[in-house]
Image (cartoon, helix red, strand yellow):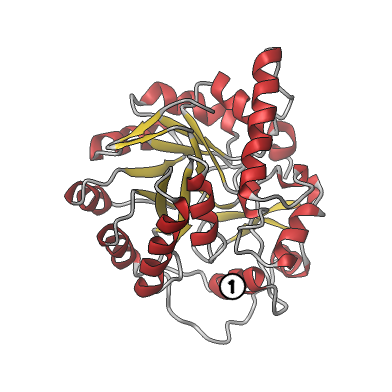
Amino acid sequence: MFNKILKLGKLTLPHAIIQGGMAVRISTASLAGAVASQGGIGVIAGTAMTPEELRNEIIQAKRLAGGNGAIGINVLFAVKNFAELIRTALKAGIDIVFSGAGFSRDVFIWGKQFNVPVVPLVSSGRLAKIAEKLGAAAVVAESGQAGGHLGTNRPIEEILPEVKAATNLPVIAAGGIVDGYDIYRMEQLGADGVQMGTRFAASRESNASEYFKQLYVNSRAADSVLIKSPVGLLGRALRNTFVDKLLSGATIKIEVCNDCLKKCKRNFCIRKALENAQKGVGSNRLVFAGQKVYAIKEILSVKEIFDKLKKEYDEARSSKKTLNTSLQSTYKSS
């Protein structure tokens, strides 16, 4: 994936590495700009931002990128102001739009109007075919090993070949990818690029709190669990006191409702729980993370992460071996 040209619509990127868009306010301008400066695609998570805040984040990220890489946006389709945020980003000059947790036909129409590539996250070959017909520039094949909201419970080893066979578009692999050995393995499976969220959440430029980052560093494999999100999807998170309450079936009282979702199960306020984790405050903290988060043992700068990923990738490629990082057995038991 290093020095492998990735073409997405009008964009040509020197590295096929995409930083996942992580809300709430985990991946902001500081992280997205740093990733783009290294030649990747840095993604701002627009969910829960105001249009003005998002506009300012895009301007700052582009300045930090220094003309390198690209800056993208990802907004949860389930939020009520999805259309407003996407159109705000397009008007602000965003380079690429990622659509997660569902997508509509409208986002492809808007992308075409602004000549901006749209890349949806899919979890099956069927969805990939639909995305291609609607005008997607590529698709992200996201597995159940990813952090945050999930559209499937299947591992990337199953989904990636299926999606590759279903579409002629570039396919980006996502879920359970944290090091250069994983990147090489995805390339061997046919991926045209990779999306990595968890590894970049544990960076110095990440906007996550120290509490959030240390939960990553101190995690064990057994700490990665699935919770029922108010959005109506499963979410992959790390165990803590709050998550243990959710796993027990408890309903957490919502003190103030901003009515932010199109549909909400109201078992807890996900926006508040994610904000608490990002800030490191309050008792109800929800920390999303990919299943292989336990492999991350240090907080590095984005540049250090890229250097480390490249070194590991080169080692795997030169030896013609891949690290046995398949998570299928542990995933199916989680």
Give the residue at mark 1: 275
Can you name the residue that lies furthest to the left here? 113
Q: Residue at x 53, y 47 (%)?
A: 35
Question: What amino acid type is highlighted by mark number 1?
Answer: Glu
Q: Quadrant of the C terminus?
A: top right
Q: Residue at x 42, y 70 (%)?
A: 261
Seen in the image, is 44 located left or right of residue 200? left
Q: Position of residue 22 (x, y in %)?
A: 54, 57
Q: Quadrant of residue 250?
A: bottom right
Say above or below: 276 vs 141.
below
Q: Position of residue 49 (x, y in %)?
A: 43, 71
Seen in the image, is 49 located left or right of residue 304? left
Q: Position of residue 282 (x, y in %)?
A: 70, 80
Q: Position of residue 72 (x, y in %)?
A: 40, 51
Seen in the image, is 320 located left or right of residue 32? right
Can you name the residue that lies furthest to the bottom here? 255
Residue 28: in sight, yes or no?
Answer: no
